[in-house]
Image (tube, rainbow, N blue to C red):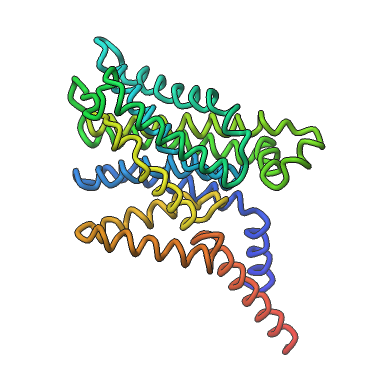
Amino acid sequence: MSAPAKTSRSRAVDRDPKGAIRLCLALLLAFAALAPLRLDSYGFEIGFRLFVYVVLAEAWNLLAGYGGIVSLGSASFVGVGGYVLVGTLNRPGAPFVLAWLLAGLAGACLALLVSPAVFRLRGIYFTVGTLALSEALRLFMVNVSWFGGATGVFLQNNAPPTHVLYFYALGLFALTTLVVSFYTDSRLSILLRSVRDDQDAASQLGVRAFRVKLAAFMLASFLMACAGALQAYNLGAVEPYGMFGLQWSIDVLAIVVIGGLGQRLGPIVGTIFIVALGEWLANFPELHIAITGLILILVVRFAPKGLVGLFTSATKLLFAARAWGHKAQDVGR
């Protein structure tokens, strides 16, 4: 192939990054759907964990990356989803799909309920407010015996096999990918980013900032609650310290920042990296936390767009170097 053809192809790829992203997502979904043909029980467990964390990270990236809504309250919606699912399934004859849907709707309703209060806060105050919400819900569940108190609630029926949970998580991952892709490619994303960049200016131009943020907040909360419901179904029980634990919020934040905040593939890359690192250091939990923290600091300092942004920048530099080399050859001729 001639040099001009290569240059034009690289420019086409640079002009249409959405096409490359869609291709990557389609290939990933196809691989995940075919992977069970070669997976054992351990592989199904890892796949289930990957999908749950990707859904949480996609939802959080929609809020923080596209909307500038930096929340530390992910555990609130994870816990609510888990409790609603277990409470619904413990009723005789309740189907799983209905319980799963109710869990997601409970997360969205919680977001709607608290939004008038938390959206009055901005910046670090909003972040602290969402953290206080998750802690308040955890303490509420601990002290109210109707929800099982500190002991929690156990699922009366046995959880399905691991491979069944894998396909449930895969379905949620596929739904999340489609919904978030549609959202980020639509006019709603433009409105959300305008509010992120300057809420006051966007409001003066006619953007209803509260409604725009509320739509993203409810959608992200619905997805987080669905992921929390799956986690509870996998464990067969819910208890406040686990379902409302701060670790859910911290892990999701680390995944998105390392993968790439505001990058479409950032949550997926970050999840794969964090889960692989966790498995590699499974026997050294203290070392795992220290290394994850060090990597997070290095990424924030030297690669603010995360691993995806670093790869994108390196690819652009490579294409530019090749184009410059071809032009130099043409001049030499």
Which quadrant would the N terminus be assigned to in this image? bottom right
Asked whether, in this view, residue 83 is left or right of residue 115, the answer is left
The answer, for residue 280, to whether it is visible in the render is no
- Which residue is depicted at the point 22% across and 23% down? 155
Residue farthest along the right direction in this orientation: 205
Of residues 168 and 114, which is closer to you in this image? Answer: 114
Residue farthest along the front direction in this orientation: 143
- Find residue 59 and report its horizontal and vertical position in percent: 49, 39
- Which residue is depicted at the point 65% across and 81% down? 325
Q: Is residue 175 above or below residue 147?
A: below
Q: Is residue 77 above or below residue 199?
A: above
The answer, for residue 138, to whether it is visible in the render is yes
Of residues 301 and 124, which is closer to you in this image? Answer: 124
- Find residue 235 and report its horizontal and vertical position in percent: 23, 33
Quarter of image, res 229:
top left
Of residues 2 and 205, which is closer to you in this image? Answer: 205
- Which residue is depicted at the point 57% across and 67% down? 315
Of residues 164 and 246, which is closer to you in this image? Answer: 246
